[in-house]
Image: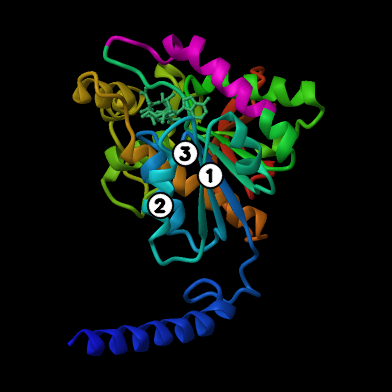
């Protein structure tokens, strides 16, 4: 009986070895390695409420060939878990400042959901003192280890963390305004949901990522719905208060994580497509801007290079 089991498992491992050899040259399932360039994505804050589902969603993205998961704690477990999923990318976990350089090296896209979230009664600005320091340190390391990477800033307050990142990169001499993005995709996701609750609608959201600075343009939504002024007002207010709605519903257990991971994955995918030369990729993002007199403003960005609005 035992011998039989031994023979069976021998057979199985030799079958698995040949499957592995066969699978290797093809790279991702359904993609040949020639048509999809290798791309490394690093997630900083990967063991957090956003970081974990975002790590999962990036593991599912066939445009990613290497996924680096960094946090100050708990990344080995997250990396081992996500790493068992049989998709294209190789996953590695990095923990603590000593391993930050390795996590960042050769990254094409760095996504930053590191930092503290809100509790009921707080504004995003109340996170400034802690998160500004975290973002500053992480961006200094990005300037050192992967100065050409595209940076997707999720940590709040986005209206401040993006300008902080810009200053850190300027000081390091690595600033490229076309590669620094505040992730406001969740505002767009919410505006779309509240507008129609369907996937095939479009609602641009401009301005910033806090309260009344979030400006959904329902007048430019497609398909057009000819909404009454009161409806537009109500939809606008719900979009602006979307973050607070989740913070209150979670009652002290943090802010939006799952919808943010979804939004972050959409935005990172757009960045990867832009890097890979896919034309006409448009997303709203909080970027350095000349659209208004404000130095940073969320608006439509095309191919992650040119402001179109
Ligand atoms: N841009 C947006 O639309 C949204 C932004 N956020 C923001 O995202 C941030 C993260 O939120 P959650 O994931 O819910 O928080 P969380 O507390 O669940 O996770 C944060 C993670 O960051 C890690 N971290 C702390 N300092 C770090 C450092 N120096 N380096 C690397 N990792 C570090 C923590 O260990 C933790 O695992 C918050 O600032 C929150 O306000 C949240 C939702 C939407
Ligand atoms: O509201 C928060 O603190 C988190 C956030 O930015 C959002 O959900 O839009």
Asked whether disc 1 touches disc 2, contact meaning CB atoms under 8 Å apart, the reply is no
150 above or below 255?
A: below
| 131 in magenta | yes
* In this rendering, the label closer to the viewer, 1 or 2: 2
What crowding class fits label 1: few (fewer than 14 Cα within 10 Å), some (14-19), or many (20 or more)?
many
Q: Nearer the viewer, residue 280 or 51?
A: 51
Name the image quarter holding residue 6.
bottom left
Q: Earlier in the sequence, mark 3 or mark 1?
A: 3
At x 36% / y 55%, what residue is drawn?
A: 200
Q: Which mark is residue 283?
A: 1
Q: Quadrant location of the C terminus?
A: top right
Q: Which colouring convention does the figure follow? A: rainbow
Q: Main secondary structure of the magenta part?
A: helix
| Residue 8 percent across, percent down from the top left | 29, 88
How far apart, in angstroms, are the residues tagged by discs 2 and 3?
38 Å
Taking the image as drawn, is residue 233 in sight?
no
* In this rendering, the label closer to the viewer, 3 or 1: 1
Q: Earlier in the sequence, mark 2 or mark 3?
A: 2
Which residue is label 2 attached to? 80
């Amino acid at each position: 009986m035992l011998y039989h089991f031994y023979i069976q498992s021998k057979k199985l491992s030799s079958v698995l070895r040949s499957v592995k050899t066969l699978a290797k040259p093809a790279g991702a399932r359904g993609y040949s390695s020639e048509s999809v360039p290798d791309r490394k994505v690093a997630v900083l804050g990967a063991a957090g409420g956003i970081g974990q589902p975002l790590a999962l969603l990036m593991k599912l993205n066939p445009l990613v060939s290497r996924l680096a998961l960094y946090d100050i704690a708990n990344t080995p477990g997250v990396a081992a878990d996500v790493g068992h999923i049989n998709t294209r990318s190789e996953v590695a976990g990095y923990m603590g400042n000593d391993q930050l350089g390795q996590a960042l090296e050769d990254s094409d896209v760095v996504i930053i959901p590191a930092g503290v979230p809100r509790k009921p009664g707080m504004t995003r600005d109340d996170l400034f003192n802690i998160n500004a320091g975290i973002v500053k340190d992480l961006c200094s390391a990005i300037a050192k280890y992967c100065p050409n990477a595209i940076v997707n800033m999720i940590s709040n307050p986005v209206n401040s963390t993006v300008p902080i990142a810009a200053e850190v990169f300027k000081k390091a001499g690595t600033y490229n305004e076309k590669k620094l993005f505040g992730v406001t995709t969740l505002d767009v996701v919410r505006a779309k949901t509240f507008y129609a609750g369907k996937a095939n609608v479009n609602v641009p959201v401009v301005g910033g990522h806090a309260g009344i600075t979030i400006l959904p343009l329902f007048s430019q939504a497609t398909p057009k719905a000819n909404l009454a002024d009161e409806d537009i007002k109500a939809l606008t207010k719900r979009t602006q208060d979307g973050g607070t709605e989740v913070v209150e519903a979670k009652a002290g257990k943090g802010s939006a994580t799952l919808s943010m991971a979804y939004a972050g994955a959409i935005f990172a995918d757009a960045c990867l497509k832009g890097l890979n030369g896919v034309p006409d990729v448009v997303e709203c993002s909080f970027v350095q801007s000349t659209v208004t007199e404000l130095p940073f403003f969320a608006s439509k960005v095309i191919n992650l290079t040119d402001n179109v609005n």
